Image: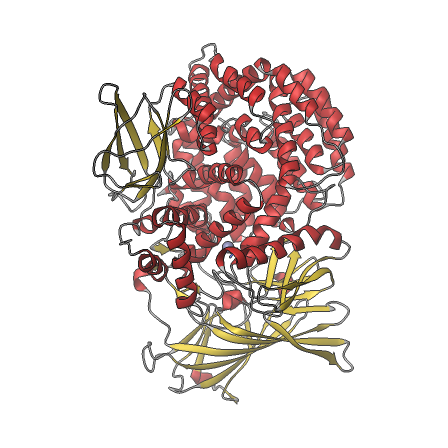
Amino acid sequence: MRTENAPVVRLEDYRPTDYLIDTVKLDVRLHPTATRVTAELALRPNPKGTPGAALTLDGDELRLVSARLDGVALGAAAYAVTPSSLVLHAPPQRPFTLTLETELDPSANTKLMGLYRSSGIYCTQCEAEGFRRITYFLDRPDVLSVYTTRIEADREEAPLLLGNGNPVERGEVPGTGRHYALWHDPFPKPCYLFALVGGRLDKVSQTYVTGSGRAVEIAIHVEAGKGERATYALDALARSMRWDEKVFGREYDLDVFNVVAVSDFNMGAMENKGLNIFNDKYVLASAEKATDADYANIEAIIAHEYFHNWTGNRITCRDWFQLCLKEGLTVFRDQEFSSDERSRPVKRIADVRTLRAQQFAEDAGPLAHPVRPAQYREINNFYTATVYEKGAEVIRMLKTLIGAEAFRRGMDLYFERCDGTAATVEDFIACFAEASGRDLSQFFTWYEQAGTPTVTASSHYDPAARTYRLDLAQRTPPTPGQAEKRPVVIPVALGLVGESGRELPLKAGNEVPLANGVLTLDGPALSVTFTDVPERPVPSLLRGFSAPVRLEMDLADEDLFVLFRHDRDPFNQWQAAQTVATRVILEATRAARAGQAISVDARLGEALAHFLDSRAEADHAFAAQVLALPTEADMAREIGGDVDPDAVFTGRLAVKRALGAALADRLAALYGRLASRGAYSPDAASAGRRALRHAALDLLAAGDAARGTELAVAQFAAADNMTDRFGALAVLAHLPGAARETALADFAGRFHDDPLVLDKWFALQATIPEAGTLDRVRELTRHPAFSMGNPNRVRSLVGSFAMGNATQFNRADGAGYDFLADVVIALDPKNPQVAARLLTAFRTWRMLEPGRRAKAEAALKRVAGTPGLSPDVSDISGRSLA
Ligand code: ARG
Ligand code: ZN
């Protein structure tokens, strides 16, 4: 067992291993409680290591059965076994073979790391450090080996046996009722990419022919009877493969590609070589059971894991500090894929919403860390929005700065030069410096410095000289361990918009480099004077959200309305409307906090009315984004400190009600006009139509609860797909009364046997912003479909409450915090990863008003003081309180 006082691992301490493992031959005899693993490791001293050093292999919860060196049993004096290692005191200083036999219990594996059983299916999760729970090994990403795996199991229990690479052979074990399959993966890989699956599963498959004519059998395996629900994922996989060939020139490299969906999984999915393992939530979809958002997630995550085959597997990470090398880059790639498959501007808006909600929140609190952290205690706590989402933003900025062509050349160079290696972020950036001829040393700061930079902008127009001066400045607030901050390289994509909406010419008068409408702010400040500006412009800054920064500029509301109406950049149209809405909600929140009457500025409603009349039909998905107000969490971040979540809720709701009332007729007309016709299709245009229809209903219901209830009840009853049914239920969730409870009961009855659908039902109830919700959540923890052992159930109920219910998690009496602390303490011994993730709900606790802050701190301290905590939870509680 690992201990609470896990040591700090530092990037600066990296050194290569003393031994290498060239090949691994595994023989895995699956058994529900006593699985036997024989590992034959071909080792040799690493020329880069220390000659004569002892060999320390990692291990966790293993029972060593036997150990042989070059076929001869090891004497007791030759090695030592500890709870976390097997040490060979004096290994031969030549190539040698170590054969280790271990036993483990997959059924007792509740951490869901290593080899475990999920609903009777044997599966594995080895990233980051799970392989050591299968056999003793050098469990780190810079040890690359060629694997041959023999998997044996009872034929009845596990007719399907899958491994990495290509299938070699299968057969019976005579007289035992058992059979085996032999797999060989020719590509050297780190052990975190190892996987195997054994079980009784249904499959959907097709033949995919790569650009160069190689036939690949692509297959998705799901729980018996659910094959039909995997066809969308299979299609998304084929589209991803084609896209990577077209856009990045990358082909698939094995004869088969298997995806397996399991119902107990700590994260979203895993890119094991040739054998991706997925949380079934991100595979299974049908019109009746999945929403449009589910379909979009499935498409994105299928693509993400597939894209890892090149960015992660063919080129992997030297150490876990380089996690963003594969994750940030692969998120960038999946975002680009979804943008090409769907609507680019709408995808951008959705991604920026996520970035701000997750990454900006993380960056503003005690868990802030750089995209490439310099130290960690528990690596599983660094699969974060910063590594993934900000990591993707850094790649996007790189592309903006050097241009699309140099970016593609840099990627080609990276694939060529680093293929087959365990690389660093430095190796990656060097390819782009070379391809573009640019010095990217300052750009590298984005990887090393935590915190969200704030860019402030001010400007002056001189009508006589027809010049327009723009002054930009940047600063980054201090973050834990980084008091002083350097300026970063910020690409500011911009345009100047005339009063009537025309795009004004962009001519920089002074020596400031301006390329393709992008200014580079790389010092503390920058002044640009634009010449030949025919009228007072409204600046449209950070178009397309060209950098992950906060922008502060005192534009008049009227100027924001100009951008909302006319900006040629759809992102900034949307941003302008959001900025006005933020201002209006801030004022309402202030009034609510002060106990004053709330009055809502009518101009926002007028601008939205104009938008609905003139542009809503042009792009439904975009219009839905415009109608969605900033969330309570967005507002809390905007306020920044001394936050009273009740005042935010009251202020925001008042604005929503006022808009709903002011726009009632238009919203009702829109709602009627957009009614779905024909059979459900998950395509982007149809999904956009439904999204706008639900946004209209949501706003309408805020303005007129009776009318909203009536429409939602009708929609709920008539729905022939989950998007419509759940959309109606989500509106009803905010309308207390019998109609809501009836619909909730109906939904539970209808989908009682489908855990993934019930997750939506758990989540929705957990986010009801009413005083009774905590009791409701407590009650639901006793529901027969709920289980603390299943990560999806826990995240749906407890995670949604803690992360998605600002007023009830942050109850003034502290009961929400106490509940979360109780769950974390109870869950930690069983599943530390999920427990630690839940605990990050406290990441913004210091922004709260003093009363709640004290209660949150007390709850965190209670967690931190619990004896025997996992390194996962101890790390999060410790850093949260520091
Ligand atoms: N590499 C996976 C992905 O992003 C994530 C796996 C993380 N698992 C973990 N236990 N930390 O695609
Ligand atoms: Zn990933």
Residue depicted at 52% across the width and 63% down the height? 130
In the foreground, 615 or 815: 615
Callout count: 0
Q: Is residue 625 left or right of residue 143?
A: right
Q: Report which quarter residue 594 is drawn in.
A: top left
Residue 642 can be seen in this image: yes
**Quarter of the C terminus within the rendering:** top left
Residue depicted at 31% across the width and 47% down the height? 449
Q: Report which quarter residue 3 is drawn in.
A: bottom left
Judging from the image, the colouring scheme is secondary structure
Q: Is residue 238 left or right of residue 202?
A: left
Give the percent coordinates (x, y) of residue 849: 40, 26
Q: Is residue 489 left or right of residue 787?
A: left
Give the percent coordinates (x, y) of residue 79: 44, 80
Residue depicted at 40% across the width and 53% down the height? 405
Placement of 156 over or under 556, stated as above or below: below
Q: Report which quarter residue 92 is drawn in.
A: bottom left
Give the percent coordinates (x, y) of residue 502: 41, 25
Give the percent coordinates (x, y) of residue 345: 50, 37
Placement of 738 over or under 383, stated as above or below: above
Placement of 219 over or under 724, stated as above or below: below
Residue 270 can be seen in this image: no
Q: Residue furthest top?
A: 597
Residue depicted at 72% across the width and 68% down the height? 158
Placement of 632 over or under 71, stated as above or below: above
